Amino acid sequence: MMRLFRSQTRIAAAVLLVAAALVPVVSSDVYWYNVIATGLVFGVLAMSLDLQWGYSGIINLAPAMSFGLGAYSWGIVGDRIEGIGGTYVALLAAAAVPALLGAVVAFVSFKAGTREIYFALITLALTLVLEQVALAATGLTGGSNGLLGIAWPEIGIPGAFEIVFDTPESYYYLVVVLTAIAFVVCTALVSGRFGSILAAIRESEHRAETLGYSTLRYRVAISTIAAALAGVAGMAYAPLTGIVDPSVFGVALSVQVFVWVAVGGAGTLLGPLVAALLITAGQSSLTGSSATAYLLVIGVVFILIVLFLPGGLASVGERLRRLRRGRLTALTPAPPAAPTPQEAQGEGQP
Amino acid sequence: MNGTDVLNIAVASVFTVEVALGLMIIFGVMRVINMAHGELFMLGAYTMVVVTSAGLSPWVGIVLAPLVVGAFGMAVERAMIRPLYQRRDLSSLLATFGLSIVLQQAVRLIFGPQSKTVPTPIEGSVSLLGTTYPTYRLVAATMAILVIVAVGLLLYRSSFGIRVRATIEGAEVAEALGTNTTRIASLAFALGAALAGFAGALMAPFIGVVSTMGLEQTVRSFLVVITGGMGSIAGTFGGGVLIGGGESALTIPFSGTVAQICVLGLAILVMLVRPQGLFSRGGVRTA
């Protein structure tokens, strides 16, 4: 049954991406290329959060942080190094810089054990700092005006063959392919052994520890991978908007990513991808005060999902129910419905 | 460092402690990570905007703000936080994260994206420490100190305070011994919110009032709680002085961004070296 469901999900994802790839056949409207490509890039960002929140029970309050670092990587490198070399250097930076930061933050936060709240808080604080850095380092980032005239990427082998994605249509195809790769990689990650161990840690940290798994190592690993993925999504996003400014680090974007994942269903990958695509398409016509109202509505929707649709959040609760670790009681798993008073008190307390 | 710098650092410390104390009470009693805490501060500042633009004295706003924001906090607790207690996970963190964006956008829709100014209740300045300093800032900081002392007395010298601290120490035991922890939680949330709102109202005349002003307050308050120690009221004072005063002091030789990075680095260092917080006694508290 589970296998069937999974393969159905994969078929649905394949249908979605093939349909997306066929859009240029039926329409040559550049506007829609842009909207759908943006939706797909946001979908990759949503999958990155889903890897953490849905599959690993880790709350990263600032998914926009890695995304913004990726966008600035391309904005800064693409402007300075031309051609294929620039694309490769930027791609490396877009993945490696957020990955390194994600790894360090995860290591620091989870080292002392039950510190998932710290991870949430430190990511939020860092994104605020990065926004300030982006504003202050005007020589590199253009300050509050941001970087304009974002270059188109090129791939290939220097001298042998080169593809420049310098039209909205060609770039659109690149984004569809990128989204497909991201989906396949994420699916492979969460359905393999690695994914099972992450789920085990999410469900019961001390049980996983007892079985000999280093929960720290796996949490750092998934945080690193998710950050790299979000960074690449950010890089892909930059040419679509043509501008990279400090708002890519904004809390407004981070909240939206949470809404995509919550609406689509945490722990499903395809759900957040579809939700990001549809919500972005619906939002694209809004500007000015209606954009402010949109964020208001998004926030209300998010609160309502948290309050009344806990299904998507159940996985987070399971793991937090077992905050205490390394105790002898860990050897006798308590029934999940009846946490001990100590555990009940420990809830929410890192 | 001249007299003005010293006074600025002192004022920053006082207000950081006041805002973080509100956060700490809410966290301590309910284990709720209130991501909308800075927005409660923001609501206090906007109460001042409404009152003064209606032609009333700023003092009216300073009195009204804690009442309005406290009542709002109580309503939030009833509607959003209480249903999530049984969930025992990070749901309340996510819900209040959503609330923070809702409040920001609602205020932005009503008052516009521009920064507002609020008239100062007391004009003029006084000579102190070899410098002239705005009188109102000293008065505001003094009022904040009085409120902090009052809250301290409330927590340590009243039966309500005993019940609050008992709930912080262990909700189930407090409940078993006859404390209505549901009511304590409601009042504590109102108190925490009122502290944030009061700080926002007091500071409104000398800072820019804008819908996004809360986030910085939220993050700083959490750095205070991490540095001082989660669940420690005394730690909040030490952490507040260290983070608020330290950030303010660092902006003298460096930029505000560098100062922010430094205090964040300090909090991370504390997390690594002394996870229970600098001012907490004993080992890591698991409950």
Image (cartoon, rainbow, N blue to C red):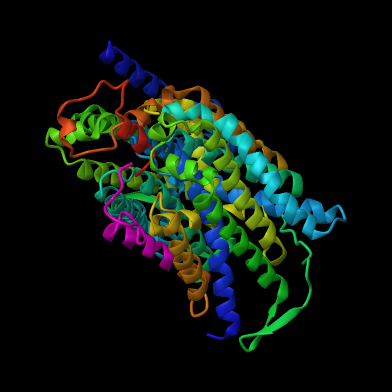
Q: Is residue B277 magenta?
A: yes
Residue closest to the eye, B160 or B107: B160
Front residue of B213 and B137: B137
- Rendering coords of residue A64 (x, y %): 46, 47
Relative to A134, residue B72 above or below:
above
Q: Is residue A170 a member of the stretch shown in magenta? A: no
Extreme residue in the right direction: B55
Identify which residue is drawn at 65% across, 54% down: B198
Q: Tell me where residue A247 appears, x and y as whole percent.
A: 55, 53
Residue B100 vertical placement versus B148 (above, below):
above
Q: In the displayed image of the protein, which residue is found farthest to the top?
A: A1
Name the residue nearer the viewer: B168 or A178: B168
Question: Which of B32 and B179 lies nearest the eye of the viewer?
Answer: B179
Q: Is residue A257 left or right of residue B115?
A: left
Magenta span covers which residues?
B261-287
B95 horizontally vs B173: left or right: right
